[in-house]
Image: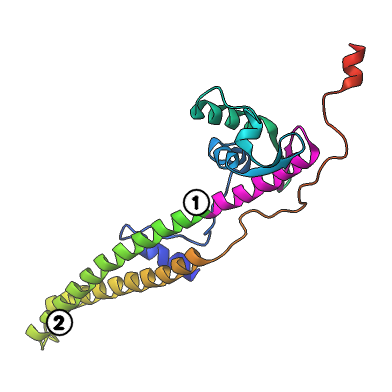
Amino acid sequence: GGQSQAAGLAAQFGINLPTGQSEPDWVYPDIIKSRTLARAMLKRKFNTEKYGSQKTLLEILTHGDQDPTVGLDTLIKDGVNSIIGMIDVQQSGSFYNLTVSASEPVFARDIATVLLEELDAHQRKQNKAKTSETRKFIEERIIDTRQDLEASEETLKDFTERNRRIENSPTLQLEQQRLSREVLVLTGVFTTLKQQLETTKIEEVKESDYVIVLDPPEAPLKRSGPNRRKMVIF
C-alpha cells in the first residue's frame, strides 16, 4: 500500500514507477518459437550418432558432413525454419508442455534441454535490459528532482528571511504555506525515487529463475514417426 501511494505521488510529476509486479508476463510459446531463440540455438553444439560429436546445430540441420552449397544467410534461414518446425509447445493449466521432434531420441532430448537454457538466458537478458533502463531513468529523475527541491528550499528560505513577522498578514501566511507544501511534495518525490533506485539496483543484480522446469526433458523410448505399418498398408 505504501509503495502504491508513493508511486501515485510520483505519477503526479510524470514519473512512472513499478508498482509491485517487477516481472512481466512472458508469452512463452511465442518466445520459444521465435527466430531470435532459433538463431541462438544454431550456435550450440550437439553429439549425434550420424554426424559425430560437437557439431553445431546449424551443420546438423543443413549440410551435415558435406560442404555447404549455399551462402551462410541461406543456411541460417533454413536452420531457423527447421528448428521452429521441430518444436511444439502446448499449455496445460499453468504449465507448458514442450515437445521436440528430431531424428534421434537423445538428440531430441538434448535440443529440448538446450532450448530451455537459451530461453532462460533470453529472459534474463531482457529483464536486465529493462531494469537497467529503469535505473537510468530514475537516476535522471533524481537529478532533476534534486535541483527542483533545492530551488524550492532556497525560495522558501528567502521568503522567510524577508518576512519574519507574518502573523498579521493572511496573504503572507498563505504564500508561506504554498512554498512549504511545494518543498514537502518534492521531498516526498525525492525520497520515493531514492527508494526505487535502491530497489532497482537490487533487482538488477538479483539472480532469478525465469524458467522453472517441472519435469526435465527425457529421451523417448520409441519413435513418434513415421508409422511404417501404416505406410505399408497404404
Q: Which type of secondary structure does the marked residue at label 1 adopt?
A: helix
The span from disc 1 to disc 2 (Cα, nearest Å) is: 46 Å
Residue at x 63%, y 51% (from the top left corner): 117
* Amino acid on which the number 1 mark rests in the picture: Gln
Whether residue 227 sits left or right of residue 20 in the image: it is: right
Q: Residue at x 74, y 40 (%)?
A: 107
Is 153 colored magenta in this rendering? no
Question: Taken as a whole, is the magenta stretch helix, strand or loop?
Answer: helix
Q: Nearer the viewer, residue 46 or 190?
A: 46
Q: Where 62 falls versus 160 (above or below)?
A: above
Residue behind mark 1 = 126
| Amino acid at the residue labelled 2 | Lys
Where 13 falls versus 107 (above or below)? Answer: below
On screen, residue 30 versus residue 71, left or right, reads: right
Lower position in the chain sequence, tag 1 or tag 2? 1
Q: Tell me: 161 left or right of 128.
A: left
Q: Residues within 10 Å of mark 1 (few under 14, many from 20)?
A: few
Most foreground residue, 152 or 98: 98
Q: Which residues are magenta?
A: 95-124
Residue at the spot 81% in from the left edge and 43% down from the top edge: 219
Magenta-span inclusion, residue 111: yes
Quadrant the C terminus occupies: top right
Name the residue that disc number 2 marks: 157
Tell me the number on the disc at residue 221. none
Q: Assess whether mark 2 and mark 1 are in contact (beta carbons under 8 angstroms).
A: no
Viewer-nearest of discs 1 and 2: 1
Based on the displayed image, in which of its 4 quarters is residue 141 positioned?
A: bottom left
Q: Position of residue 65 (x, y in %)?
A: 66, 31
Element assignment for label 2: helix
- The residue located at (49%, 28%) in the rendering is 73
Indicate the quadrant where residue 84 lies: top right
